[in-house]
Image (cartoon, rainbow, N blue to C red):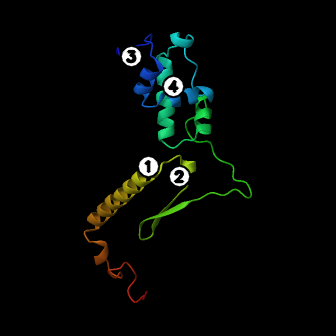
Amino acid sequence: MKPATGTERFSIDQLATLAGVTPRTIRFYISEGLLDRPEGEKRGAHYLRRHLERLLMIRRWTDSGASLDRVRELVQGASEDPPPRRISAGMVEVWSRVTLADGLEVQIEPGRAQLTPEQVRSFVRGAIALYRQVRSQATGARGDAPEDQPGQSTKGQPEGRTE
């Protein structure tokens, strides 16, 4: 295979290899209207750089957790920012409440945020790291550690309070 240029032609197998999908997936995307049909017909059918670019965009969106309906909207020119979803009576959403630290929680609805489980885990790890960084800067500026603050027990509960 030659380096990809604007006029290079690809077979379905070459396109599939370059995009990291199967030929069956390419045919499915064509049948769903997500990808244009190949140029030419029958054995002379070939794909161009624009087909490869579209496939790579579709992969990026699906790998980030976007549904095929959402990909269809994006292909048709919708903004990449998820549109605000109207909540109607009877609509069910599953929210995750993640405790980052004592007194610090984040609520996430991965579907609406278009986050895969791995992206949610990465987000949580990053938020915890940021929290620890902010806490260490705050305690460093005061010169004392949180457990050494007057009026606080080692568990973070005010003195005199029992659990």
**Residue carrying label 3:** 4
Q: Is residue 56 left or right of residue 36?
A: left
**First reached walking from the N terminus: tag 3 or tag 1:** 3
**In which quadrant is the C terminus drawn?**
bottom left
Q: Nearer the viewer, mark 4 or mark 2?
A: 4
**Residue at left 50%, top 19%?**
50
As drawn, the label of residue 44 is none
**First reached walking from the N terminus: tag 4 or tag 2:** 4
Q: Quadrant of the rendered structure where residue 150 is? A: bottom left
**In which quadrant is the N terminus drawn?**
top left
- Residue 79 x %, y %: 58, 34
Do callouts 1 and 2 mark residues in contact (Cβ within 8 Å)?
Answer: yes
Q: Residues under labels 4 and 3: Cα distance?
A: 14 Å
- Identity of the amino acid at label 4? Arg
Q: Residues under labels 3 and 1: Cα distance?
A: 31 Å
**Residue carrying label 1:** 119
**First reached walking from the N terminus: tag 2 or tag 3:** 3
Do callouts 4 and 3 mark residues in contact (Cβ within 8 Å)?
Answer: no
**First reached walking from the N terminus: tag 4 or tag 1:** 4
Looking at the image, which residue sits at the far front? 43
**Residue carrying label 2:** 110
**Residue at left 57%, top 30%?**
28
Q: Residues under labels 2 and 3: Cα distance?
A: 36 Å
Disc 3 secondary structure class: loop
Please tell me whether residue 149 is drawn above or below residue 14 in the rendered image: below
Please tell me whether residue 56 is drawn above or below residue 8 in the rendered image: below
Disc 4 secondary structure class: helix
Q: Depth check: give the residue in front, 50 or 107.
A: 50
Query: From this viewpoint, is residue 14 visible?
Result: yes
**Residue at left 40%, top 25%?**
18
